[in-house]
Image (tube, coloured by chain):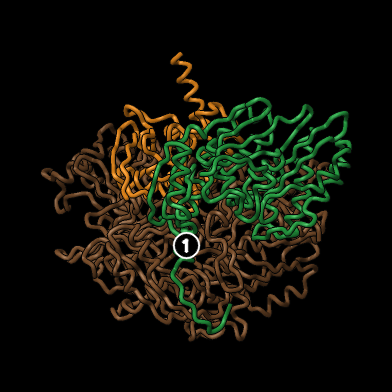
Amino acid sequence: MTNYIGKAVRRVEDKRFITGKGRYTDDITLPGMAHAYIVRSPYAHARIISIDTSAAEAMEGVVKVYTGKDIAESGINGIPTGWQVNFKNGDTMKEPPHPLLVADKARYMGDAVAVVIAENREIARDAADMVEVEYEELPAVAGPKKATKDGAPLVHDDAPNNLCFDWELGNPKAEVDEALDRSHHITTLEFTNQRVVPNAIEPRSAIGHYESASDKYTLYTTSQNPHLTRLLMCAFVLGIPEHKVRVVAPDVGGGFGSKIFHYAEEALMIWCSQRLNRPVKWTADRSEAFMTDAHGRDHVTKAEMGFDKDGKITGLRVKTYANLGAYLSTFAPCVPTWLHGTLLQGLYTTPKINVDVTGVFTHTTPVDAYRGAGRPEATYLLERLMDTAALEMKMDPAELRMKNFIPPFDGVEQPGYQTQVALQYDSGNYHGVLERALEMAGYDDFRKEQEKARKDGKLLGVGFSTYIEACGIAPSAVVGALGARAGLYEVGQVRVQPTGTVSVYTGSHSHGQGHETTFAQVVADRLGIPMENVEIIHGDSEAVAFGMGTYGSRSLAVGGSAIMKSLDKIIEKGAKIAAHTLEASEEDLEFAEGKWTVKGTDKSVGFGDVALTAYVPHNYPEGLEPGMDFSSFYDPANFTYPFGAHIAIVEVDKDTGKVSLKRFIAVDDVGNVINPMIVDGQIHGGLAQGIGQALFEGAIYDENAQLTNGSYMDYTMPRADDLPSFELDRQVTPCPHNPLGVKGAGEAGTIGSTPAVVNAVMDALSPFGIKNLEMPLTPERVWRAMNS
Amino acid sequence: MATTIQVTVNGKVHSHEVDPRTLLVQYLRDVLGLTGTHIGCDTSNCGACTILVDGKAVKSCTMLAVQADGCEVKTIEGMAEDGSLHPLQEGFREKHGLQCGFCTPGMIMASADLLSRNPNPSEQEIREGLEGNFCRCTGYHNIVKSVQYAAKKISEQEKVAQ
Amino acid sequence: MAGDELLILFNYLNCKTMIPNKFDYHRASSVDEAISLMAQHGMDAKLLAGGHSLLPAMKLRLNQPGVLIDIGRLDELRYIKKEGNELVIGAGATHDDIAHSAAARSTFSMLSEAADLIGDVQVRNKGTIGGSLAHADPAADWPAVMLAANAQIELRGPNGARTVAAADFFTGFFMTALEDNEIITAIRIAEPPKGTGSSYQKFMQPASRFAIVGCAAAVTVDGGVCQKVSIGFTGLADGAFRASNVEAALTGKKPTEENIAAAAQLAGEGVMPMSDHFASEEYRLHLARVYAARALTAAVR
């Protein structure tokens, strides 16, 4: 029996957030704390001729100014990369140094040149104006394909043609070429999956706190991933013993990927704090966040899909130039390769697939995982191809998908589905989600309405997207073989107190996902105790043994499973104690609803009594350790594969080109659901971000690689009045290989929604013979297309 | 040239000397320690710093502390009265109108202004009333539901009071 | 700009932040005191009303005044009233005050329509019409409406008061007829003749919520014919302007769809349009035609 799982339990964490008692990094003030302001390059590419800090340092209230030279002289290292993708010929990928402050050259607009530390934020800000930096501006390049051309300005001298790696996956290219050559029809799309800025509403912040008496360091930081930050910072950058460093990621105001990575400012604050022997805080302004938070997407792609005369897919060939930015962020090389190429099977039985990706340095902000990370790019590519192919072949886009779907399989009775691009899908029923979405949309009626509207001069359109994603990247041995420099397991510790209350320590980190609720639901149900008796602790390396953090929709599938493993150990040990208490044999006991009962009798002992006995072991099984505290590392057997069908309905204003999103229908299958309210919320937010990319968002770099829209005055994000209420439903196909049967829900909305919206606009514009437009579909872009 | 201001915040009178360039949001956060009001941008767009000044929603990042001299300020910390949550706070929890919580205080304060003008707003009116507040987590879907919940609750409370 | 050019730069360009420069602050207790404070501090002083144009610029340090003179509390500036056949709006009236003023709406509905489309709720609660007019942002909403309403703008300085017609007030890119030592005190708008309708229609820049193109139109229809047509544009060029060619094309004509469409076609003729990420010159001109038609159509409805 479950009391909690599957129910829309209200969130435990909300109380503090709705009363203003959340504690975010910038809310923390430590005694004696100084404030840092970072001087950043206004140029995308410039040699630093000289820096004069004397005027700034002479100002009252300025504590110190450090430059790249100080960093270089201190002998510390730069920011490392957590993933390695080599060249096809076996050469090691190019991994140029990424110093905390640059001494020689600035390589993107916003590259950190100096740090001013002062008694307060205002003085630090004023003093930054007085740091005199002499630059020699150099030519710069922002576009990834352009950057590979001979003669393009180099970001790093030792990376010719700005190449970081090149990479290929799938069937041999010759086989794919042949399949396409024999095809009845080939649909080709060339497009840019534009660069977007994550824009968590909380800007990044870090406080370094060195205490000389104990020689200990504490870093408070806006991180999705505090343990990994500690590992990278200690072992690779600063060379400080890990046990001397505590990393705390308190309440974090959204991440969407951008707070996974170890950033220079984190190590810099620790370094400054140690030098100055006092706490130092840095908090980004939004303008700074635009320049320095890792961006997402930025692929230049050509994709070709072949079909036979019945509309069955015969092959897929993809060439992508992936922009990595000026330096390699933590997971940058993995995103356009193993998180992108591996998803190009989609939901379809495509027999031959070849994907070729070139990773390129440019004079731009580093690019890394942003909600979906690689999978939205793959889905965009496939789903745009499908709707375009349907248009070209005069087929219905829903029918074309149905015709090509992989047949249902549960991963238990039927085996998993082996793709052409390395993955084995766990379980799926792809027809089911599309059928349900069509029904919700009233698809047949819509087509009639659309026909009528066209006669009245109104442009309505419907677009589809049927997606799959791979979540909970795993197992460690496999990802290690693919280049990961870390394991991708998770840690879950369950500590039962003598009175039967439970503290759970998880390596997952909650920054909006609601782990404090969902995880507690799981624990309370498994142990048969009230949720109030369960506390979830996360985000503090001193409390939690270890962790790999939260990203890739992995928390419940991996972190939740680790907790389940520990719960199993608790129940197993509890059974030994219960058997002793009940004078029965362990095999005769069953555990349910919080008590061990001798089968077929009414003899039982409750969880609380067993917990107490474990800590007061007077009458206790011989040889059994006292206490009830178990920790587990869970390393998944496979990825999980959520999927779904999204339908967008739009209207285009014929006069202005403005797109209005009228309806959005999403039927997602994320496996078992612990808290439907939270899962729906995750989908809603994901949809808004995906819709944002389709219609509004995009970083714009000019010919000097200047970011020209780095503020909320210039970068459009969806607001409440830009979106409709979403129409959601779900199907449940449990994950066969994790104990909770869950697949992950954090990214689904973002992955599915973008192509659905773009397809809908293309459908609305089909009377104009328009087949492809670049995102975002701004009014002017649409208007131009209608009038060209 | 420091200036002395007297501001009533959540019913309590405060008097401080401030540098004129101190923004109201910095005064609330740094001087009064009311860190429930957040800073999400530097261009007056995101609404995370929204508070009520003399009953109306303003962005406290676009107001100097000296401008609030003599004013009644209400922040998220002052919304719950006598230990019971304001209907908006309750609505945001009941309808899952928040995820990371960072935009939430500003969103609740902007909603308070909205409901004070329009106690029974339509979905469209709610969406337009919150045009000055970004949320990156919820897609606004459940925020709309939260405000609707609060509107209903407030009108029920008023009926009972009558 | 490439090559080996040497540049020394104090980091003004990219040091954007929350924090304004240091300044002295005075709160004026009357308009007269404000004027004398301005005289005292000269060019170094700036008036602070709602602060919703000035403070954002100061936070980014695009504007670094040494002295702020706060006129935001002056009740003598915050009113909306009818005086004879005139609507008088105090310069300190907020956008929100105007949006909810029955007097403003009954004079010209475009006043409340425009007020309601400025920024967002929070901005409208603090920002004032006087501040907006003095700032004269080329994409601000009020200037277009003031032009279409033939508003008279009252100014006061050390040498007394004067009145400037809106058409003479806006002189260019962030430029007005306001002298450095003057303050806007009120806006006077004559009650239009019976049969006058008006509308403000705005194509919004989606991020900033300023106008890419805003068109204010007031049309007096008598005997089935447009007797008087006034059109103000904002967002299109480097400053707000009257579209006299469109006005002339519709004046004396019946307010039919065809006549409106024909007149609207002239919108933007001879104008040097602005251009940005959101709208090229060509697209802005197109929007001017579309929004002229929309505003005129709504005005005569």
Eyeballing the image, is C248 above or below A282? Answer: above
Relative to A352, is B75 on the left or the right? left
The C terminus of chain A: image quadrant:
bottom right
Q: Is residue A759 visible?
A: yes
Q: Residues within 10 Å of mark 1 (few under 14, many from 20)?
A: many
Q: Determine whether the residue tagged by mark 1 lies in a helix, strand or loop.
A: loop
Query: Relative to the observer, which residue lies in front, A644 or B68?
Result: B68
Instruction: Decide: is A324 above or below A210.
Output: below
Quadrant containing the N terminus of chain A is top left
The percent coordinates of residue A515 (x first, y second) are: 39, 48
Left or right position of A787 against B50: right
What chain is the brown one? A
Chain B colour in the picture: orange
| Residue labelled with disc 1 | A638
Q: Is residue B65 left or right of residue A215?
A: right
Q: Residue pushed farthest top?
A: B162
Q: Answer yes or no: is residue A521 visible.
A: no
Quick one: which residue is furthest to the left in this view?
A618
In percent of width and height, residue A503 lies at 27, 47
Report x, y in % for residue A26. Answer: 35, 53
Of all chains in the rendering, the one displayed in green is C
Q: Position of residue B149 (x, y in %)?
A: 50, 30
Left or right of A679 in this view: A615? left
Seen at 59% across and 33% down, the residue is: C89
Looking at the image, which residue is at 41% across and 79% down? A97
In depth, the one of A556 and C79 nearer the eye is C79
Q: Residue at x 77, y 70 (%)?
A: A183
- Looking at the image, residue C107 lies above or below residue C269: above
Nearer to the camera, A69 or A49: A49
Disc 1 marks a residue whose amino acid type is: Asn
Residue depicted at 19% across the width and 49% down the height: A627
